[in-house]
Amino acid sequence: MLLDIKQFSLAIKQIAEEKGISEQRIIDTIDAAIASAYKKDYGKKGQIIRAKLDPLSGRILVWQVKYAVEGVDDEGYITGFVIKRDDEIPFIRSSEDDESGDLKIKFNPEKHILIEEAKKINPDLKPGDELTLALEEKADFGRIAAQTAKQVVVQRLREAERESIADEYRKMTGSLVSGAVQRREGRAVYLDIGRTLGLLPFLEQSLLDDYSVGRRFRVLILSIDETPKGPMIILSRSHPRLLEKLFELEVPEISAGSVLVKGVSREAGFRSKIAVASKESHVDPIGSLVGQKGIRVQTVINELSGEKIDIIEWSDDPAKFIANALSPAKVLDVKILSQDKKYALIEVAEDQFSLAIGKRGQNVRLAAKLVGWKIDVRSPKEEMKAEEIENQESKNELQPQEN
């Protein structure tokens, strides 16, 4: 079988560029397809046939593989050293009484050869080694064999393309990509993100977003999940890192490293808090994120469909950081009740109490997530003292938990 190498090479190169896979992977796929077609028309049941394209001569070489084995017992099972291979399945396990757990494999003369016979062809062979036997070249294949070869090529190229796509996006995990809504299935949304579709599950969506077909969004590549249909790119619009990445795009100071994002807490579709610090004394971290006339933060808010964002100045002083985190409420005093348990009592003015707590406790909840402390907000009118709160906490810890 002769092949026009020039035309073949051009075709391989074109397919590799279109599919984003290596040329060698395509050649290996074609080799497997030729072997499959050869076996369909000229092979025998149980034979292991392989093929290889010779890039110098344009000739396709075909050969049969047999595994050298030590011997065969009276029941026709292989004895001695056995290597379990994919093409040996199905195999028969030893009986339950046999504690060795050895595999029992039927001897097949089409895929096995006794070591004595194998050494006559190649004296260097050992049990478990492969013996290759050249087969007669064939130029004509039947319709069924050709169809089989085509199916092998299509299937393997599809698998290779999926693996290539998965590898590409796996390296981008945690990064932003832009995608357009292609369709919805139930509450799940599928976005076209370039080479493939990404899945935006319901739990990773923002309640403020309108996922109409054709709408474009920036999404975070959350993970690559393996499914029966191949790798699936999981996207997110609710992850806190999405907010951080959006500010990286809009704020050059973050990309340059002069402003650091120290933490993010977020309840997607409602409110977010982001803590920032400056590595340079002349750079205002909050002003950098806000931008001139608020254009930078407004761009991020628009991308998040109107989600409210609080920009907090980070501090290594827990009391100061907690006070900043409760923004926009103004804090009168911060009492550190337990440094080890990270528990603090916050005192705010009466008119700032509801603002500090937030709607359904959202503001204080986000502040607690941001600083990593348990925060208890009190107003001056409340008579409970810090010591009483600490004593009450101790009592609660000592009380047995109800089942």
Image (cartoon, rainbow, N blue to C red):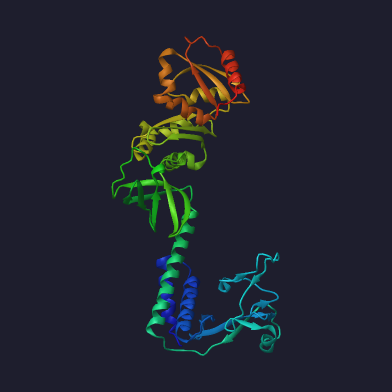
Q: Is residue 389 left or right of 165 when viewed as pictured? A: right
Taking depth in this image into account, of 261 and 81 the one nearest to the observer is: 81
Q: Residue at x 47, y 53 (%)?
A: 225
* Percent coordinates x, y for residue 65 in the rendering: 58, 81
Q: Nearer the viewer, residue 320 or 80?
A: 80
Q: Is residue 16 above or below residue 330?
A: below
Of 285 and 339, nearer the camera is 339
- 227 or 363: nearer the viewer: 227
Query: Quick one: quadrant of the C terminus?
Result: top right
Q: Position of residue 190 (x, y in %)?
A: 36, 51
Total number of numbered discs in the rendering: 0
377 left or right of 194 in image = right
Residue 294: image quadrant is top left
Q: Position of residue 342 (x, y in %)?
A: 59, 26
Q: Quadrant of residue 251?
A: top left
- Residue 216 x %, y %: 33, 47
Relative to 31, does residue 22 appear above or below in the rendering?
Answer: above
**Residue found at the far front of this picture:** 97
Q: From this view, report whether residue 153 is shown above or below residue 237.
A: below
